Image: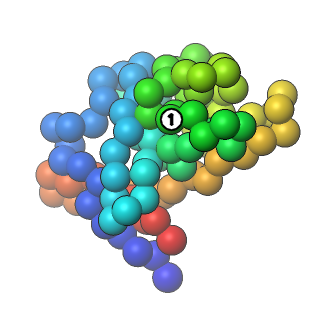
Amino acid sequence: MAQWVRLCGVEEVPQPGKVVQLEAQGVDVCLANVNGTLSAMDNWCPHRRGPLGEGWIEGDRVVCPWHAWGFEVSTGNCPEEHAHVDIFPLKTEGGDVLVDIT
């Protein structure tokens, strides 16, 4: 069963081409805006736990600021390194962006 919780207000989402690190009920989330489409993923790179929310976007990937591993926003995969981060479903209700952290 989904556990939808408030991640941020719609006015707080990053600009297109940017990422931010946010927290939802103790879960650190990287929120990315790729060409106007929002995506949420686990904030911690599996390589050395680099904070993805402090990284940047290249194409359809969030790039870790520590060692430049790039994670696809649609799948969470980093094919070159055989690595993966969890993707969290998002939805907007009223003025809030909600994330399913289950």
Above/below status of 34 relative to 97: above
Splitting the image into 4 quarters, where does residue 59 fall? top right
The number of numbered discs placed on residues in the rendered structure image is 1
Let me know if residue 88 appears in the view: yes
- Residue depicted at 46% across the width and 65% down the height: 101
- Residue depicted at 18% across the width and 47% down the height: 9
Q: Position of residue 26 (x, y in %)?
A: 37, 62
Q: Residue furthest bottom?
A: 1
Splitting the image into 4 quarters, where does residue 75 fall? top right
- Of residues 65 and 5, the one nearer the viewer is 65
Let me know if residue 32 appears in the view: no
- Of residues 61 and 93, the one nearer the viewer is 61
Q: Is residue 53 left or right of residue 4?
A: right
Above/below status of 79 relative to 102: above
Q: Amino acid at mark 1?
A: Pro
Q: Position of residue 58 (x, y in %)?
A: 58, 17
Q: Position of residue 91 (x, y in %)?
A: 35, 56
- Residue depicted at 65% across the width and 47% down the height: 85
- Of residues 34 and 12, the one nearer the viewer is 12
Above/below status of 52 relative to 24: above
Q: Residues within 10 Å of mark 1 (few under 14, many from 20)?
A: many
Above/below status of 20 relative to 22: above
- Judging by the rendered image, the residue that carries numbered circle 1 is 51
Q: Position of residue 90 (x, y in %)?
A: 41, 55
- Residue depicted at 33% across the width and 65% down the height: 25
Query: Mark 1: which secondary structure?
Result: loop
